[in-house]
Amino acid sequence: MNEIPSSELEILLTHFSWNLQRLDEVLKQEKSDYFKSAALQRFGHTYNIALKIIQSYAKSKSIPCKMEERCFETAVQNGWMKNQPEWKEIVAAFQQINQKPQQNTESIYSKLATYHYALNYLFAQLKELIEH
């Protein structure tokens, strides 16, 4: 096992929690262009921190996951994340909102609550594993 300082994982958990809360808040706002854009941006931040914590926790358990797709696959295989929505869909949504110009934003926005639920499940699973 690679030794990852527990403080690093705890900090990542804190950041993940904060981003999930902000995503939840923005999803409850009116569906104006401003708040839709803010929600997509917050999804991007939440995705990035989710990826970082999966990589860090996997590394602490000597599980390789350098590439995004492999990390989410690892999370599903280890029960840290459910496969609904399919993790490939979440990765694709992140990639699409980071293209210039952004693609499929309305479709992705309509699925953000589902993605939030999936990422929140990931958070709860990792929190339980890290804190015990």
Image (cartoon, grey):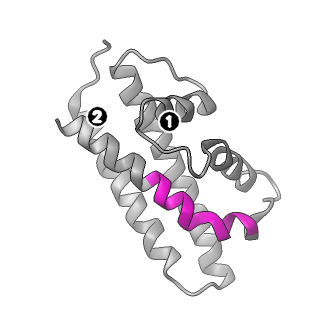
- Where does residue 4 sit, x and y in percent of width and height? 29, 23
Nearest the eye: 129 or 67: 129
Residue furthest left as drawn? 132
User: Residue 128: percent from the left, percent from the top?
Assistant: 24, 42
Q: Secondary structure at mark 1?
A: helix
In the picture, measured across the screen, residue 57 lies left or right of residue 45, that is left
Q: Residue at x 27, y 44 (%)?
A: 127
Q: Which residue is mark 2?
A: 8
- Along the line of sight, which residue is nearer the eye, 32 or 122? 122
Left or right for 130, reference 103? left
Query: In 3D space, how far apart are the residues under numbered discs 1 and 2 (Cα atoms)?
Result: 22 Å
Number of numbered labels in the structure image: 2
Amino acid carrying mark 1 in the image: Val
Residue 62 position, x and y percent, is 39, 15
Q: Residue at x 53, y 62 (%)?
A: 42
Q: Earlier in the sequence, mark 1 or mark 2?
A: 2
Please state which amino acid type lies under the numbered disc 2: Glu
Q: Residue at x 55, y 62 (%)?
A: 114
Please say if 31 is above or below 66: below
Label 1 Cα neighbours within 10 Å, binned few <14 / some 14-19 / many ≥20: some
Please state if 38 lies on the left or on the right of 89 as rendered.
left
Q: Which residues are magenta?
A: 107-119
Q: Main secondary structure of the magenta part?
A: helix
- Which label was assigned to residue 76? 1
Percent position (x, y) of residue 46?
Answer: 49, 53
